[in-house]
Amino acid sequence: MQLITTNKDKCNLSYTCIRVCPAKAIKIKDNHAHIIANRCIGCGNCVTMCAQDAIEYRNEEDYVKELLEREEKVVAICDPSISGEFDDINDYRNFVGMIRELGFDYVVEAAFGADLVAFKYKKLFNNFHGKYYLSTKCPALVNHVERYYPDLVDNLAPIVNPIIAMAKVVREKYGKDVKIVSLSPCVASKDDVKFFNKSDGEIQAVLSFVELRKLFKEKGVTETRVEFSEFDPPFARIGGLFPVSHGLFQAAEIDNSMLRGNIISTEGRNNFLRSLEEFQRSSELSQHLDLFYCDGCIMGPGTSKGGRKFSRRSQVVQYVQKRLNTFDEKQWQKEIDNYSHIDLSRKFKIKDQRLPVPTVDEVQAVLDEMGKGKIEEQLGCGSCGYETCKKFAEAKVQGIAKFEQCSSMTIKNMNAYIKKLGETNEKLTQTKVALKESEAQAKEEHRMAVEASETTSAMLQKLPTGVVIVNENLKIIESNNSFVNLLGEETKLLNEIIPGLVDADLTKVIPFHRLFSTVLMNGEDILKKDVHFGSRLFNVSVFTIKKNKVVGGIIRDLYAPEVRTEEVIGRARDVIKENLQTVQQIAFLLGESASKTEKILNSIIKSHTKEE
């Protein structure tokens, strides 16, 4: 399982984690911060700095509880900085009793391992032959050098850290089959212990101080419920100071004075990074480096948030002083001699994770795209997580940064978007006004159409002639009372049930419905067609209203007195008109014939006269 992960539901993209990550092992992916496992050095800085608690390290509480329930012996190795974390416990013996109450069979101090390791450093520094070393008691330092300073891997002091040294002591004293749990403020050590096997300092689990507090709370373990209990041997001397700067070397009485010493001790993220950079590049830095990534182990990411550095430092120093009051120098020396044969050496590997260095043109192209092509535009506000705009541009080329991280670019894009949104809103307002006007116009037109329809319907009902309008399926759309009255009593009864015979089937109402079908099909009107309806004679005209969709019919009863007189007059006029046209044609033909005869006679006369 990955050491450090992100809870995407809690992440609010503040980019704080990116700003504090020394390895640039965090990128934005799927709208949340994503930890790049092979680049992560396990320093836990992102865990400490995330205000939303969105970044978490691997929890090993359940595994430790499982170990404690087994039949096997389980040993707890306590980091000396535990006194700075649990300053709410009055006596360290109460604290040891609380750990035993959880189920641990033995509780030992990692400080004795620090005593052993300190003498190894003393020997190394006294015989370094011009080669300067980096202390390796901090797992985050080891990870960082292996991944990002491969040229310095040979400068890593080939010595295990105090926790591993103590694990080797425990296996020799209490048996190789015991299970070991480290109680530590260090998150990186959760992965670091995996590189050691049973014969070489194996540790089954690392429990952070925060996780230890949770176990106490879950089990209801408090100092008032336990008896005093002393640590199990072997006991430490000054090794308990190793969680603070210079502390490890005091344990071996290594001279660390500014004039006579050859060691630079420093702590904290910024000093950590700068000192490594100078150690690699500067030939004038002719000293060993003793580094902590954190502000000492007392401020490790596995400790409770809000702790005060100098208060914790004071607690650690006071604890060591208190232990020295009852310290047995001879017994301690005997123990040191007993375990001096243990192999505390360690080897390191290059795990190069450096990304290709972008070209000048690639970086400049990104800066131009950001609108920061000029030097004066590269403010380097740091909000993106990178020290300068150039560093951000490099990360963008390397694929571990996104433009969204640049606040100035985001603000610029946001302002452009707001402007565009304003223009869109203005257009929408204008469209809204136009729509209201169109709606008002449409309502007025609808009102007028309704009025026109009502007027037309009223006029239709007043006509003495039968009128019917049907659709393409010969369903009646509208008809007037004259049409209903023409068709007889059954149709009148139907009209009472369905006013206007709306949606009635025309084929069930009149026998001459084929006239309507014909006009619907070919679109040609049929005018004044006489059809018989029972004992009556109707004159029918069918005409197109909407081609192939809607047709109308006008039906007149030729036997009706008013229609009969009108029809006789009309048809008499048609006969007179036709006769007149015939007479005119005959007259025309006669006139044309007389003209030809006259021409022939004149030509004969002229011919005759010439002969005479």
Image (tube, rainbow, N blue to C red):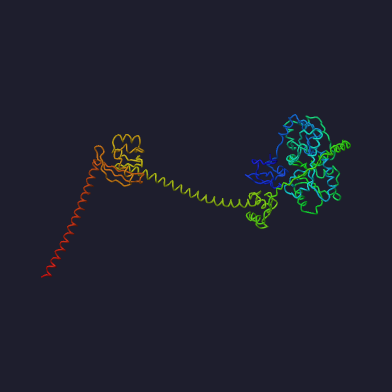
Q: Decide which of 119, 609 is in the foreground and name it.
A: 119
Judge by depth and name the residue closer to the eye, 388 or 30: 30
Q: Residue 150, how many percent across, how many down?
A: 74, 49
Residue 37 at x, y percent in the picture = 68, 43
Nearer to us in this view, 588 or 182: 182
Q: From this viewpoint, which residue is outermost toward the right? A: 330
Count the marks.
0
Which image quadrant: the N terminus? top right
Residue 277 to residue 173: above or below: below
Quadrant where the C terminus sits is bottom left
Q: 326 or 555: which is nearer to us?
A: 326
Residue 371 percent across, percent down from the top left? 63, 55
Extreme-left residue of the structure: 612
Residue in the picture at 21% in, 51% down: 578
Left-right relation of 418 to 26: left
Quarter-of-image position of residue 240 = top right
Q: Position of residue 57 (x, y in %)?
A: 70, 40
Identify the residue at image location x=76%, y=33%: 179
